[in-house]
Image (cartoon, grey):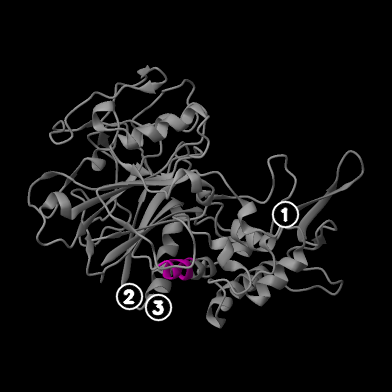
Amino acid sequence: MAVTLVVWNVETFGDRWNAARGANYAPVCNFMAQALYAANADILVMMELRKSGSQYLPTLRAALNQLSGNAWTYDFIPGSVVSSDPNAITLGYTQQGHAEGYAVLWRTDHPEFSVLRTRVAQSGRIVNGISRIGLVFRGRTSNPNVVVNGWYNAPHFDPVNPPAPWLRLNFLVANPIHKGDNRWNLCRRPCYVVLNLTRPLQPRTKQLLPIVVFHATNHKYSTPWSVQSHAYSAQLYQVDDTNQANVTMVSVDQAIAAGDFNIDHNDRNNVDWDAYTTFTEPFANGGAGLQRTWVGSNEDARNLTAVRLTHRDGTPITTDDVNDYRWLAIDNLFSDGLTPVTPPSLYRGPVYNLLGGLKQNGFLVNSAAKRRVIRSFDDAVGAALGPRQPNGSFQNYPRTDPANGTPCQARKTDRGGNFIYSGPVIGSLLNYNNYVNDLYRGYFLTARTAAEFYVNSISDHLPLVYRFTV
């Protein structure tokens, strides 16, 4: 049998975009459940969880339970350390860490795996004193601010006999003053989840699978070093077998590293690209010894993960090919010791192209039930607009931008005497009527409206899907 992992940067999950996502987040959670069900997902690791997003995780779990008929549960964790004392760790959603954390949802009835508890319970949903998701605190590290030939110089060691205990692993804040500035607290860290695979005749080295996911920083002085530090996470080499009464470190034979790395893997001419080699270099050369899971360099165009509505010069994209709205291979997944298999889903490649599934007859809208999910976003727009007034405007959005017909909250005059409209009910639309008509249909007639829906209501990233045999 097989297990399917989905890693998804769901943009600012928890922020209140009432018109786009619905005041109670039911529309976006139902959409996510449809997408996960179509991918035959067994476990989801989500990035960009806001502090308020935890209140919507039960909604997503309920949608998955109902749609799949399986039993799902969840846990979540803030993404940063708040305390300065590494011996008294307190976690939080810090401004320096972009106020983000991580969530994990998984099937509790899957016969091929369970989720191992962490030794110390620090998550946001501790059940019976147990957490299932943790933050990376230790690893293979260099001293702060020591950069050699443009990169950290991590000490070499035998991966079968790592240091005990592992050293404290620092990360980088999003806007350091100097290259290589790293620190213990405030910055965003990777999360980890350990799967206990059902391999009864195998040793623990082959039963424990760490999944280490990181939303890297996005700054010229921090991004490549934060990606490199992710590859030094202790959990990519050793995990604590918490099924044992005392700390029992196991040097694992398999691992997964994934995330939004904010470095285009297709841009080999970018000097920051070398950060990716830290994952694939052998241990002796200072790397983690993982393998890239993509299908081949000649097909890298299929792995574009970011979604945009405009070209680099700011002009809108208007073509009817959904792939024209994809750019940058910044969400990536690396693995070691696993045998990947093709997920049973209607998409190509490891990047889950949800845009194609939204167009007429696509796999996300090819039934009445699926179209009802899209229509619920139209209901959210109507609720945000408020009652229609006698003059034809809406109570909460009384102005209409003549450029695209979008209801707006206000307008003002610029220095040239031209009107500027602000506070649109939905942003970045070429034609408001076309957009809401497609929402009402429950499917999208053009690639443009499909991309507008995805960017406005779901995320600016496409998910990764990785399926492997157990």
Residue 431, x across and y down, in percent: 77, 62
Taken as a whole, is the magenta stretch helix, strand or loop?
Answer: helix
Disc 2 marks which residue? 70
Amino acid type of the residue tagged 3 in the rendering = Gln
Mark nearer the N terminus (1 vs 3):
3
Q: Is residue 172 visible?
A: no
**Identity of the residue drawn at 41% across and 23% down:** 181
Mark nearer the N terminus (2 vs 1):
2
**Identity of the residue drawn at 43% across and 40% down:** 94
Disc 3 marks which residue? 66
34 lies left or right of 384? left
Disc 3 vs disc 2: Cβ atoms closer than 8 Å? no
Q: Residues within 10 Å of mark 1 (few under 14, many from 20)?
A: some
Q: Is residue 454 visible?
A: yes
**Which residue reaches farthest bottom?**
368
Chain part drawn in magenta: 32-39
Disc 1 marks which residue? 423
Residue 13, x across and y down, in percent: 49, 56
In what element is the residue under mark 3? helix
